[in-house]
């Protein structure tokens, strides 16, 4: 049984202008010990999914349909008393901005201790030794435990947040843009630590990022999101041999560590408004290969290769797409 199974999830935000269809029919699974990366441009619904899993959506965010099964139990319909046993203890999150996640007036050590002691019956000694161990695991010197948050650099605070997410030994850890805003070297070191935690502690992980290279280097499985939908889904073949034009565009847009000489090409234009998303394929107005059918008919995710799904009407034209997608003029045409 999958640790997490998201089924046809729909989450809309109520706004003055109507409903923003932030997540619209998303499904994915994370098996025990698996590391799934959700990738996509800003505003495509990644954090909304993370918040729905932890059931911390803002009041105007409504789960309109679907299920979120955690070890087979549906978090969407779960009573809040049962939910409390799972939130943070079984499922924890390293949030998008660690800057504001620590209380500035308490020492880091006290905040980690509080996280353990409010949830677990344990002695101070046991809790402290656990905290020291976690600090080592994320690459922080335990001498710094007595520091206040402002004495930490951004990277150190983010490491401390990862330690915080691990305090209750959760089954599933969600890291939402956990390294955004840090410099590239620090990002890399932190992602390496997260991967190490995944491997050594056999944690099931969900990594959320807008950076294709980050998922390619870290995750076993990938979901590529665009405007509230998953466009492509599967194992490493998703970034090695993409089928969807959007994924091809994303791969082009990020430098990879192995192919540094490659020219970066960005996808022109912006994601659509989710208040009134385009009919047919949501990517059709930015896709260089759009045909009439793409405007009329929504392509559904379908199997295109082994354990590899793509939501494009034209999987049979993938060779041509891959070839053309490498040429800057292919994308420039639509500007
Ligand atoms: N509280 C809210 N009320 C109304 N709309 C919202 C709210 N929160 C998010 N949205 C909208 O929902 C969509 C998805 O937002 P979400 O934060 O999930 O995106 P994301 O993929 O995490 O983006 P980013 O990469 O910038 O973090 C966006 O269009 C956003 O504007
Ligand atoms: Mg986000």
Image (tube, rainbow, N blue to C red):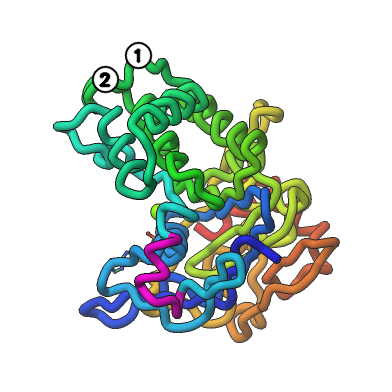
Residue 242 percent coordinates (x, y): 73, 55
Residue drawn at (28%, 40%) of the image:
114
Q: Main secondary structure of the magenta part?
A: helix
Check disc 2 and report the residue beneath it.
146
Q: Residue furthest left?
A: 105
Q: Answer yes or no: do the residues labelled 2 and 1 have beta carbons within 8 Å?
A: yes
Residue 29 located left or right of residue 206: right
Residue 202 vs 56, above or below: the answer is above
Q: Quadrant of residue 20?
A: bottom left
Q: How far separated are the C-alphas under marks 2 and 1?
A: 7 Å
Residue 81 vs 210, above or below: the answer is below
Residue drawn at (55%, 29%) of the image:
193
Residue 41 percent coordinates (x, y): 48, 54
Nearer to us in this view, 236 or 123: 123
> Can the viewer see residue 247?
yes
Check disc 1 and report the residue beneath it.
143
Q: Residues within 10 Å of mark 1 (few under 14, many from 20)?
A: few
């Amino acid at each position: 049984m999958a640790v997490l199974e998201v089924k046809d999830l729909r989450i809309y935000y109520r706004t003055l202008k109507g409903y923003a269809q932030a997540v619209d029919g998303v499904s994915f699974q994370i098996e025990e010990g698996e590391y799934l990366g959700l990738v996509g441009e800003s505003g495509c619904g990644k954090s909304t999914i993370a918040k729905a899993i932890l059931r911390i959506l803002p009041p105007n965010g409504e789960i309109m349909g679907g299920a979120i099964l955690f070890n087979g139990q549906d978090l969407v319909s779960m009573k809040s008393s049962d939910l409390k046993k799972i939130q943070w203890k079984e499922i924890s999150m390293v949030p998008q901005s660690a800057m504001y996640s620590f209380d500035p007036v308490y020492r880091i050590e006290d905040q980690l201790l509080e996280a353990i002691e409010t949830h677990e019956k344990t002695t101070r000694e046991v809790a402290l030794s656990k905290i020291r161990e976690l600090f080592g695991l994320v690459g922080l010197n335990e001498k710094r435990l007595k520091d206040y948050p402002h004495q930490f650099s951004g990277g150190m605070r983010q490491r401390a947040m990862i330690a915080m997410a691990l305090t209750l030994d959760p089954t599933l850890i969600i890291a939402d843009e956990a390294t955004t805003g840090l410099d590239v070297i620090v990002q890399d070191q932190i992602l390496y630590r997260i991967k190490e935690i995944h491997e050594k502690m056999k944690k099931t992980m969900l990594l959320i990022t807008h950076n294709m290279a980050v998922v390619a280097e870290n995750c076993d499985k990938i979901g590529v999101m665009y405007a509230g939908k998953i466009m492509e889904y599967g194992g490493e073949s998703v970034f090695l041999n993409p089928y969807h034009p959007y994924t091809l565009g994303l791969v082009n847009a990020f430098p990879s560590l192995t192919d540094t000489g490659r020219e970066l090409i960005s996808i022109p234009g912006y994601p659509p408004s989710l208040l009134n998303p385009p009919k047919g394929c949501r990517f059709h107005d930015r896709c260089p290969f759009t045909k009439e059918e793409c405007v009329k008919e929504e392509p559904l995710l379908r199997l295109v290769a082994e354990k590899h799904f793509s939501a494009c009407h034209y999987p049979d034209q993938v060779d041509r797409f891959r070839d053309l997608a490498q040429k800057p003029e292919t994308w420039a045409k639509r500007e």
